[in-house]
Amino acid sequence: MHSAIYEWEGKVREDIECELICKTIPENIPDIQAIIEKNHPYEVPYIAVFEGNIVHEGYGKWMGDTLS
């Protein structure tokens, strides 16, 4: 968890936030994004996708096998 200071609707706000990291395959990203948008308390949640272009070969195989 961390403290976030940001401007929203013309006011400076400070909240405690936590980050969620989802490891998945590209096909699952739209569904995960929809779940976050539906359940997140913020009107505009921060959602970022980082592609794992360089991943340990064994880990990449395991993830592909597990999520397929």
Image (cartoon, helix red, strand yellow):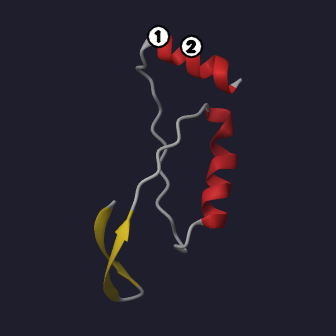
Task: For the C terminus, give its image quadrant.
Answer: top right
Asked if marks 2 and 1 touch (Cβ < 8 Å), the reply is yes
Quarter holding residue 52: top left
| Direction from residue 64 to residue 8 in the image, left or right | left
Q: Residue at x 65, y 22 (%)?
A: 66
Above or below 13: residue 61: above
Q: Amino acid at mark 2?
A: Lys
Q: Residue furthest bottom?
A: 10
**Residue 11 falls in image quadrant:** bottom left
Q: Position of residue 15 (x, y in %)?
A: 35, 75
Residue drawn at point x = 53 percent, y = 42 percent: 22
Q: Quick one: SS at disc 2?
A: helix
**Residue flagged by tag 1: what amino acid is it?**
Glu
Q: Which mark is residue 57?
A: 1
For the point 70% across and 48% down, the residue is: 31
Judged from the image, the secondary structure of the residue bearing numbered disc 1 is: helix
CA separation in Å, label 2 and label 1: 6 Å
Where residue 49 sits: x, y (%)? Answer: 49, 43
Q: Does 47 sit above or below residue 51?
A: below
Residue at the top extreme, as displayed: 57
Q: Residues within 10 Å of mark 2 (few under 14, many from 20)?
A: few
Q: Which residue is mark 2?
A: 61
Which residue shows up at 57% across the image and 67% down it? 40
